[in-house]
């Protein structure tokens, strides 16, 4: 079985790379050990958003009176889980269709680099086959990172996969880590009635975000009954009883927390083991595959993209890396008319889908100051936004940061209703090197959430109308 391009892994990096390779005239195959769509479609981005939507609907029902509507309801945990799995299955079937449509061969099994231009694939029946390819793209993704003090057993100490399919709703849960995974699951379970405590090692939750975003999310979480412990570390977990007892080291001393279950959400580890990197001498750095800006490894004909390489572990990053990688290969073989532009990792949007939502791109205020910029900052509260008030969701704000000297749009940080749908405007504007003046000269429809970006820019430049 010989191909031009073989992709190992069918997540949003792998399957997108395979489709682009096929579009550019390469004979292409994709190897997948589990389900097409990878973690994102089956156990990550998509099913979690289905869970979060159920939580939001339940929250709306609980607050229906605020909208002049009499409604009551209860959450059927198993039905919520079932809906989420149904959404994931539908999306995975969609990837199957795309593979067929683009004439990409799908090879099910565990793939491992065997020799130059060869991958050994072991099927579920135990049989092996050798797949040959001129170009091999590794898109093996990542998994829940484990702490030595927090080994996942799948029952009382769980990762995100188990959190999506628990057989019954826990009455109480300790969430260790407050990145996107931690706060999304914390919000979901709290909304459905689980007592949630979040333990974060850093001195604030969502620590990669702007400090004001962290403060706003903390305020909203506390309002909904989520307990948050920062500058705190889980040192051990006792699972011998009915539930769990977690010892937590804090600035004030050690405390013991009790709950039904602990969710470990301390980050993502790259899947670089057992895929033959050592056999071919593919270099790794800090647990990830080392690549250049076009995703070439040190071994000719072997490339890597997505969560298994350095950079943000995000689905949209993996997809773009896959496209750049394939287009670069095509350019070298004269199947594409120009070398693709390398990805600007400083203009990658981040989205967190708890409530209130978080969306950001570019530098935080602190990062901009630390980099030596003289800055203009504008912050527009959603309490002054017509659409947010009409929707009954006026928590949060939009914050923009500009370079005072040249007007460069350095960053934007938003927290509130539907802000994840607004961030793309800033990404495109920054890519186009738009000035504040051009944005203010562009009409934003009213009432919308997106007009609050313009409002924040008006604040930054002393032209605010509505506050």
Image (cartoon, rainbow, N blue to C red):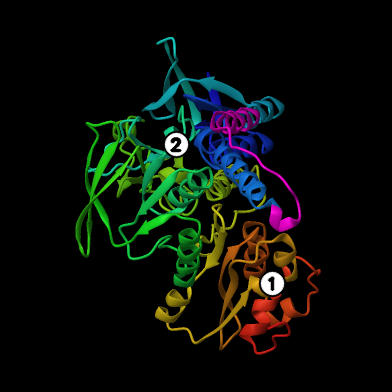
Q: Position of residue 318 (x, y in %)?
A: 52, 46
Left or right for 250, reference 442: left
Residue appearing at x 59%, y 85% in the figure: 406
Residue appearing at x 43%, y 83% in the figure: 372
Magenta part, dominant SS:
helix
Taking the image as drawn, is residue 298 in sight?
no
In primary-sequence order, the first of circles 2 and 1 is: 2
Say which of marks 2 and 1 sits in front.
Answer: 2
Look at the picture and state if 123 lies above or below 379.
above
Seen from the viewer's position, the closer of residues 316 and 205 is: 205
Q: Which mark is residue 395?
A: none
The residue that mark 1 highlights is 452
Identify the image quadrant of the C terminus.
bottom right
Seen from the viewer's position, the closer of residues 298 and 462 is: 462
**Quadrant position of residue 276:** top left
- Membership of 73 in magenta stretch: yes
Seen from the viewer's position, the closer of residues 316 and 105 is: 316
Q: Position of residue 300 (x, y in %)?
A: 42, 40
**Quadrant position of residue 48:** top right
**Are the residues tagged 2 and 1 within 8 Å (C-beta)?**
no
Left or right for 354, reference 201: right
Look at the picture and state if 183 lies above or below 463.
above
Look at the picture and state if 96 lies above or below 428.
above
Q: Secondary structure at mark 2?
A: helix
The residue that mark 2 highlights is 163
Q: Secondary structure at mark 1?
A: helix
Left or right for 139, reference 156: right
| Span colored in magenta | 65-90
Residue appearing at x 49%, y 35% in the figure: 164
Seen from the viewer's position, the closer of residues 247 and 26 is: 247
């Amino acid at each position: 079985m010989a191909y031009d391009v073989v992709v190992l892994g069918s997540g949003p990096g792998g399957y997108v790379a395979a489709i682009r390779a096929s579009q550019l005239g390469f004979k292409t195959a994709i190897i997948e050990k589990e389900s097409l769509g990878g973690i994102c479609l089956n156990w990550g981005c998509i099913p979690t958003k289905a869970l979060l939507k159920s939580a939001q609907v339940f929250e709306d029902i609980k607050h229906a009176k605020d909208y002049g509507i009499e409604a009551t309801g209860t959450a059927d945990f198993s039905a919520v889980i079932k809906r989420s799995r149904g959404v994931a299955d539908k999306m995975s079937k969609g990837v199957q269709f795309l593979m067929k449509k683009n004439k990409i061969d799908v090879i099910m099994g565990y793939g491992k680099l065997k020799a130059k231009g060869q991958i050994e694939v072991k099927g579920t029946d135990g049989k092996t086959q050798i797949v040959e390819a001129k170009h091999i793209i590794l898109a093996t993704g990542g998994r829940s990172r484990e702490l030595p003090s927090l080994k996942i057993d799948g029952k009382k100490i769980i990762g995100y996969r188990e959190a999506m399919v628990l057989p019954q709703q826990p009455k109480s849960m300790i969430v260790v880590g407050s990145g996107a995974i931690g706060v999304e699951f914390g919000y979901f379970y709290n909304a459905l009635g689980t007592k949630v405590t979040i333990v974060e090692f850093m001195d604030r939750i969502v620590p990669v975000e702007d400090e004001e975003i962290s403060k706003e999310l903390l305020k909203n979480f506390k309002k909904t009954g989520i307990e948050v412990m920062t500058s705190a570390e889980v040192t051990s977990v006792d699972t011998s009883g009915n539930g769990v007892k977690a010892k937590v080291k804090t600035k004030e001393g050690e405390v013991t927390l009790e709950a039904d279950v602990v969710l470990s959400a301390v980050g993502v580890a790259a899947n670089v083991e057992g895929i033959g990197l050592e056999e071919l001498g593919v270099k790794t750095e800090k647990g990830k595959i080392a690549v250049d800006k076009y995703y070439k490894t040190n071994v000719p004909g072997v490339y890597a993209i997505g969560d298994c390489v350095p950079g943000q572990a995000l689905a949209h990053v993996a997809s773009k890396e896959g496209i750049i990688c394939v287009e670069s290969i095509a350019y070298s073989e004269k199947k594409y008319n120009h070398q693709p532009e390398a990805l600007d990792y400083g203009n990658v949007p981040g989205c967190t889908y708890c409530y209130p939502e978080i969306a950001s791109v570019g530098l935080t205020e602190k990062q901009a100051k630390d980099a030596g910029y003289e800055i203009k900052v504008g912050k527009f509260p959603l309490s002054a936004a017509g659409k947010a008030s009409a929707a009954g969701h006026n928590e949060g704000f939009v914050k923009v940061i500009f370079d005072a000297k040249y007007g460069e749009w350095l960053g934007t940080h938003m927290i509130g209703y539907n802000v994840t749908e607004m961030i793309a405007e800033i990404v495109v504007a920054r890519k186009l090197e738009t000035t504040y003046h051009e944005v203010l000269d562009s009409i934003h429809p009213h009432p919308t959430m997106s007009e609050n970006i313009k409002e924040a820019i008006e604040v930054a430049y002393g032209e605010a109308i509505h506050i």
